[in-house]
Image (cartoon, helix red, strand yellow):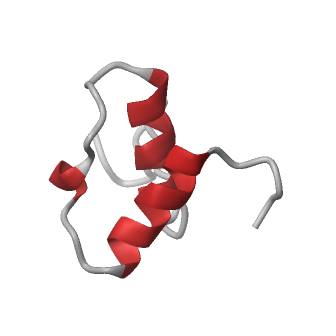
Amino acid sequence: MASNVSPQWTEGRSAKAAGQPDGANPYEAGSQESADWLSGYTADEAEQNVDRPEPGEG
């Protein structure tokens, strides 16, 4: 893990490890803190391609 992660990122990572839902994010929607928390929560998930459909889709 990088040494420059925010406390909120670490909280999100810990929340997922504890089995909490992503709705447990305690920060205001749209805030940087909320984005950091969610980034930590989803850090171990594969990145999704949202700019174009996967081959065979669409």
Q: Is residue 7 visible?
A: yes
Give the quadrant of residue 14.
bottom left
Give the quadrant of residue 3.
bottom right
Point 80% across, 59% down: residue: 2
In the rendered image of this protein, does residue 56 appear above or below residue 27?
below
Q: Is residue 49 visible?
A: no
Quadrant of the drawing holding the C terminus: top left
In the rendered image of this protein, does residue 37 appear above or below residue 47?
above
Rendering coords of residue 44 (x, y %): 53, 70
Q: Residue furthest front?
A: 7
Rendering coords of residue 23 (x, y %): 16, 50
Asked if residue 44 lies left or right of residue 4, the reply is: left
Point 38% across, 34% down: residue: 34
Rendering coords of residue 21 (x, y %): 19, 64
Asked if residue 23 lies left or right of residue 42, the reply is: left
Quadrant of the drawing holding the N terminus: bottom right
Point 70% across, 49% down: residue: 5
Q: Residue furthest top?
A: 30
Rendering coords of residue 26 (x, y %): 25, 42
